[in-house]
């Protein structure tokens, strides 16, 4: 019996060793902090903004990847020698504003010049302001976007411009969204008191506000007139994401149309291509796109961004959410509408849907 038991049950003993592992410290050299210029001057109403930042890598990852560049001297000079000084926004470091009464003149050529606190000087290549045709009309259509793993589509409103392209020369266009305002509807009657109570605590006011915001640009909208030179044409110019609040009632936005140089168009086209890569293994690796800024102290220094001097046309459109053929289910904010950033009870003075 004893031998049979030992035959059927064999016990293995494994020694257990305990040891300490010394941490391996990796020292990664900080990447270059590249100066980035983002902004333009236009023939439209001022002020316009030039934004200066430095891009950081590795070492400053916990402090943010972009740092504002404050305390710089920023000027714009035209070909006649006239100088326009930009002032730094006291509430936004790194943002430099043209005077409110300054507008770039059609036909003039402008150069941006920057001197940093450390004495380094940067300049742009000259940019000429060319005329831009007026926006004849803005129409819109709903775009639905399938979302992987979701039953409901995302959606938004595509803005489409009608314009008459001049026949005398090649034209390059760039569109940006200006400020928007929409009627914001909330439910203060459903307000719940904060912890530890969490009891219903309805508020008497307010359910309807007007919210002003700057909607982000999900894509770069540009065009050149190779296929419509001298013709009337319709072109996509902006996309506004439906966040379940903007199109519940009435939405208003200003659309800005710019005439840009051929060099600026090339820069924006490359930026657009890089921002819209699908992320597959066959995509080219992202690269820094050189703009029109150079360092006068070190011509080999990489400076990012592009300074533009543009002709501007602007047009406003109101969109009644009820007219859209598809909308996101209305978002629910159970609070006074005035607690939402950018919201106020008073309609803008020029509100006229």
Image (cartoon, helix red, strand yellow):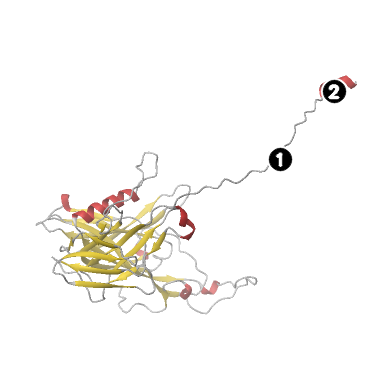
Per the image, label 2 sits on a secondary structure element best described as: helix
Q: Residues within 10 Å of mark 1 (few under 14, many from 20)?
A: few
Q: Nearer the viewer, residue 306 or 138?
A: 306
Q: Secondary structure beneath disc 1?
A: loop
Q: Position of residue 53 (x, y in %)?
A: 36, 62
Which residue extends farthest right?
A: 1
Q: How many marks?
A: 2
Q: Residue at x 48, y 77 (%)?
A: 206
Q: Of the residues under marks 1 and 2, which one precedes in the sequence?
A: 2
**In this rendering, is residue 342 above or below 15?**
below
Q: Is residue 202 left or right of residue 249?
A: right
Q: Position of residue 221 (x, y in %)?
A: 28, 56
Residue 274 in the figure: left or right of residue 342 = left
Q: Quadrant of residue 208?
A: bottom left
Is 285 drawn above or below residue 89 in the view shown? above
Indicate the quadrant where residue 247 lies: bottom left
Per the rendering, the mark at residue 18 is 1
* Along the line of sight, the residue nearer the viewer: 334 or 321: 334
> Which residue is the site of mark 2?
6
Quadrant of the image occupied by residue 298: bottom left
Choose between 277 and 80: the one closer to the eye: 80
Q: Is residue 54 something one can see in this rendering?
A: yes
Across and down, in percent, residue 330 comes to: 45, 63
């Amino acid at each position: 019996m004893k031998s049979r038991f030992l035959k059927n049950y064999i016990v293995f003993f494994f020694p257990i060793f305990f040891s300490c592992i010394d941490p391996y410290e990796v020292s990664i050299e900080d990447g270059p902090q590249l100066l980035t210029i983002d902004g333009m001057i236009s023939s439209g109403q001022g002020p316009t903004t030039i934004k200066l930042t430095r891009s950081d890598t590795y070492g400053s990852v916990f402090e943010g990847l972009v740092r504002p560049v404050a305390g710089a001297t920023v000027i714009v000079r035209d070909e006649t020698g006239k100088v326009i000084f930009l002032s730094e926004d006291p509430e936004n470091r790194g943002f430099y504003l043209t005077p409110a009464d300054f507008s770039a003149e059609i036909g003039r050529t402008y150069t941006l010049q920057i001197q940093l606190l450390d004495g380094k000087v940067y300049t742009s290549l000259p940019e000429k302001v060319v005329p831009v045709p007026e926006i004849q009309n803005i129409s819109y259509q709903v775009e639905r976007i399938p979302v992987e793993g979701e039953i409901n589509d995302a959606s938004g409103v595509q803005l489409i411009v009608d314009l008459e392209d001049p026949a005398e020369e090649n034209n390059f266009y760039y569109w940006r969204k200006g400020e928007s305002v929409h009627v914001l509807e909330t439910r203060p009657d459903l307000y719940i008191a904060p912890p530890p109570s969490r009891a219903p605590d309805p508020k008497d006011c307010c359910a309807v506000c007007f919210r002003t915001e700057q909607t982000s640009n999900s894509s770069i909208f540009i065009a050149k007139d190779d296929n419509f030179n001298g013709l009337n044409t319709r072109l996509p110019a902006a996309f506004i994401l439906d966040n379940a609040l903007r199109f519940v009632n009435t939405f208003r936005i200003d659309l800005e149309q710019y005439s840009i140089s051929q060099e600026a168009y090339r820069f924006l086209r490359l930026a657009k291509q890089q921002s819209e890569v699908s992320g597959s293994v066959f995509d080219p690796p992202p690269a820094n796109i050189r703009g029109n800024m150079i360092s006068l102290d070190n011509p080999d220094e990489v400076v990012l961004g592009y300074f533009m001097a543009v002709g501007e046309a602007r047009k406003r459109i109101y969109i009644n959410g009820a007219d859209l053929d598809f909308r996101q289910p209305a978002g629910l904010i159970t609070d006074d509408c005035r607690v939402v950033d950018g919201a106020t009870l008073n309609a803008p003075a020029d509100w006229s849907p």
